[in-house]
Image: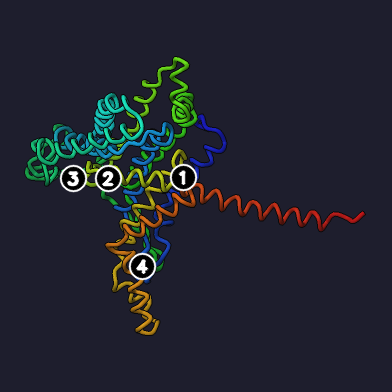
Amino acid sequence: MLGLNSKDTTLLVIVAAMTLLAPFFLNPFPEGSELAQFNAGYPDLMQRFVIFGIFAIGFNILFGLTGYLSFGHAAFLGVGSYAAIWSMKLVTLNVIPAILMAIVFGGLFALVVGWISLRRSGIYFSILTLAFAQMSYALAYSVLTPITGGETGLQLKSTDNPLLSNLAPNEIGRANLFGMDMRASFELVAGDWIWTFNSGYYIAAVVMLIAFYISIRIFRSPFGMMLRAVKSNQQRMSYTGLNTRPYMIAAFVISGAYAGLAGGLLVAMDTQVGPERMFWTASGEVVLMTILGGVGTLIGPVLGAGMIKYMENIISKINESILHQWFAFMPDGIEDFIVAMIYPFIGKGWHLTLGIVFMLVVIFLPGGLVEGGQRIGRLFGRKKKSDSAADAAANTPAE
């Protein structure tokens, strides 16, 4: 199906089902209950799940296949965002041209950065990409302020008059897809449960599924095999007379285009851009997403992106008052002690929890969350095999 083998087709179908039914999966607890704090099925967070999933998928094409670790991928995210917002301000509020412009400019900037950075490998390559990202951030923050808006960034204003959009005087335009507002939502209520279906999320989800499908085709293609060979032993390939540089630049440009796509989608969902998207911490975040999920795996980067964004938006909002509500049934002394023990790991301390999780994954699950799932699957598989073997032995007549 679609040029994929049965295993990859099954994976794509599972990802599509989970993505399309995400409002149900992410809101398992009824509104008003104490566990509703852990619900993540609201539009803004669901959009971030899929958009940063795209960002991590693109990064994994470079890092997972070639082993080249870039610390500057946020630069392409930012360039894509600025290209998208200018497309909306000057041309049209339709998100399709904005997303296409984000992909093109993200890929072109990646071509320039990759052409220079890929002259080196290892830590030197990583430092070069980090330097480019920080230079891009500095330019956006304080030098190219007429284009980037400087510290305050850019957003749609009443003075904007896109060429192909009919706006009333002093009207602030909204991002749309052929007239459909990105913020339009529909709520389904069943008892105490509320599920929100947002048009912007589903548009981003469809784009993510397309990006995921393309990544599968890249992984399974001869081009992907060549990139794996580069990761395995690039020096040996050079000794055979094969020039690996064009393959590396192509992988870098594709990865940068994915980052630009993610930046364009961020603008489509929330029409404002700031230079903080290009800061080095944003580049480090996508590295964490990929490693947590599983470097070189297909679904791993998406899982890693979802995990980090969940912790950032849900775990970080749990405060002392919520903890006291949870443990109010305990005696006062014990309640205060438990709250005092847990509080440093939540709220503003969620980074500490993320660091511990990252450390545990790197030590015990080098393959990330995907390896953890595979181990669990093998564990249950062994139990089933042992049970079937025991049944067979029990049913075998004695000689």
User: What is the C-alpha distance between the residues marked 1 and 3?
Assistant: 29 Å
**Could you tell me the amino acid type at mark 3?**
Gln
**Quarter-wise, where is residue 329 in the image?**
bottom left
Instruction: Point out the tag, 3 or 4, that comes first from the N-terminus.
Output: 4
**Could you tell me the amino acid type at mark 1?**
Val
User: What is the C-alpha distance between the residues marked 1 and 4?
Assistant: 27 Å
Residue 194 percent coordinates (x, y): 37, 62
When the figure is inspected, residue 181 is found, relative to residue 117, above or below; the finding is below
Residue 27 percent coordinates (x, y): 39, 60
Residue 73 percent coordinates (x, y): 29, 37
Q: Nearer the viewer, mark 2 or mark 1?
A: 2
Identify the element where label 2 is drawn: helix
| Residue at point 70%, 52% (across, down) | 385
Instruction: Point out the tag, 1 or 3, that comes first from the N-terminus.
Output: 1
Instruction: Point out the tag, 3 or 2, that comes first from the N-terminus.
Output: 3
Q: Is residue 185 left or right of residue 297?
A: left
Q: Which residue is mark 3?
A: 272
Image quarter of the C terminus = bottom right
- Mark sitting on residue 15: 1
| Residue at point 52%, 37% (across, down) | 8
Q: Is residue 136 left or right of residue 206?
A: left
Within-10-Å neighbours for mark 3: few <14, some 14–19, many 20+: some
Residue 167 percent coordinates (x, y): 12, 40
User: What is the C-alpha distance between the residues marked 2 and 1?
Assistant: 25 Å
- Mark sitting on residue 282: 2
